[in-house]
Amino acid sequence: MSRFWSPLVHTLQPYVAGEQPAIADIVKLNTNENPYGPSPRALEAIAAATNETLRLYPDPTSLGLRKTVATHHGLSADQIFVGNSSDEVLALTFQALLKHRAALLFPDITYSFYPVFCRLYGIDFVEIPLDADMRVRLDDYRRSCGGIILPNPNAPTGVGLARAEIETLLQAQPDVPVVIDEAYVDFGGESAIPLIDRYPNLLVTHTLSKSRSLAGLRVGVAFGQRPLIEALERVKDSFNSYPLDRLAQAGAAAAYEDKDWFEQSCAKVIASRERLTTMLRGLGFDVLPSSANFVFARHATHKAADLFQGLRERAIIVRHFNKPRISDYLRITIGTDAQCDRLAEALGEMARWNGLGPGAVDGR
Ligand SMILES: *Cc1c(COP(=O)(O)O)cnc(C)c1O
């Protein structure tokens, strides 16, 4: 605290990112990074762009990248906005589209950045409880509001909604902006992008951090009809005209062009997710059905906080949220099969030590 702070700063409750610990031989399954790495073509493009042209400002509109993304999704470049991470795209969206007199709606269990943005911008919000199965109940969003934002699949549950359900919501709420945060959609979810041409109130956001394995490059995208995109551009150009540097623009475009790499790494993550889910259920975990690159699981008898600590002592880092309704769960990023095996082995050991749970799965 300091007397030099603007008054707003005293009221902020910043987002706490998953840790990036410096532990040797760590199995890092806590921030939903992709274990397979970026497309080699993206790395080549970044290397090729690393030259004396870095003395020049980048294209402020990232037109080349937007054209590439547009082609990939069958849209036009003017329906696409790009920013320096999807967190930044979301921050601009909260300011540009989601601040109204009526409250913004989002789930009680969701991406914890949403309430942080609301406090930053002074946006009223109402948290709508997930149902007993930890699902978003869209009927609960048919009430008067200033806007709606939902991740699909939801985070940190991984549970997805069908496109048809999103469309029903758009029909029920034609007069407010509806933002669908599709950070994890490429791991088996159904994207709402095909609805954009029919629903002027729909904005969809994506990130290259998860399915394209470029969390370190910081690139996010928004899709919507022209007036929504223009709102984002107006706020961006009142804040930072050059959010994407030259390397990010080159690397991101090449990542979209390498469709094979993208599809193969998503398929590997999905296969490992199904395998890990089976192993965890065998160890006595209740695992929510996930369409993401992580699973959300709770053990029948062991406290998540204890499991988290025990894993940490074995250099395996997962995410635990000490929050109402979800403090019994661990969020586990899908790693390689070898990493998933190390995790399952460690959890099996812990269950045996305590004489609880079906520790003797492998007969020992
Ligand atoms: C990871 C994540 C983001 C942010 O992605 P970045 O592009 O890395 O900022 C946005 N929304 C959800 C739900 C996420 O899980």
Image (cartoon, rainbow, N blue to C red):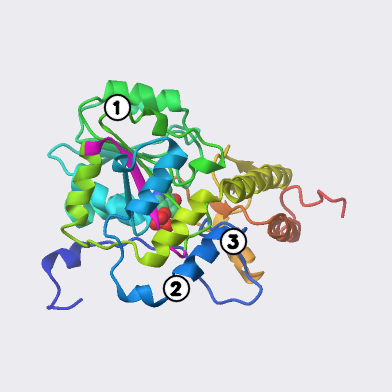
Q: In which quarter of the image is residue 333?
A: bottom right
Q: Is residue 301 found inside the magenta-colored segment of the image?
A: no
Residue closer to the observer: 154 or 251: 251
Q: Distance between the residues labelled 2 and 3?
A: 15 Å
- Asked whether residue 223 is drawn in magenta, I would say yes
> What residue is disc 3 on?
40
Q: In this view, does 201 lie above or below 331?
A: above
Residue 117: percent from left, percent from top: 26, 53
Q: Is mark 3 on a helix, strand or loop?
A: helix
Q: In this view, does 287 lie above or below 59?
A: above
Occupied quadrant, residue 23: bottom right
Q: Which of marks 2 and 3 is nearer the N terminus?
A: 3
Count the marks: how many? 3
Residue at image mark 1: 199
Task: Specify the label residue 177 is tagged with.
Answer: none
Can residue 109 be spotted in the picture? no
Q: How crowded is mark 2: few (under 14 residues within 10 Å), some or many (20 or more)?
A: few
Residue 189 placement (x, y as % from top left):
51, 36
The CB of the residue at mark 2 lies under 8 Å from ligand 1: no
Percent x, y of residue 115:
29, 50
- Which span is picked out in magenta? 216-226
Please tell me how crowded label 3 is: few (under 14), some (14-19), or many (20+) other residues with Cα within 10 Å: some
Q: Disc 2 marks which residue? A: 50
Disc with the residue nearer the chain's start (1 vs 2): 2
Q: Work out which quarter of the rendered image holds the C terminus and state it.
A: bottom right
In the image, which is nearer the foreground, mark 1 or mark 3? 3
Do the numbered discs 1 and 2 sit on residues whose CB atoms are within 8 Å?
no
Q: How far apart are marks 1 and 3 (CA)?
A: 37 Å
Q: Which of marks 1 and 3 is nearer the N terminus?
A: 3
The residue sitting at the right extreme is 363
Crowdedness near tag 1: few (<14), some (14–19) or many (≥20) residues, C-alpha within 10 Å: some
Q: Could you say whether the residue bearing mark 2 is in a helix, strand or loop? A: loop
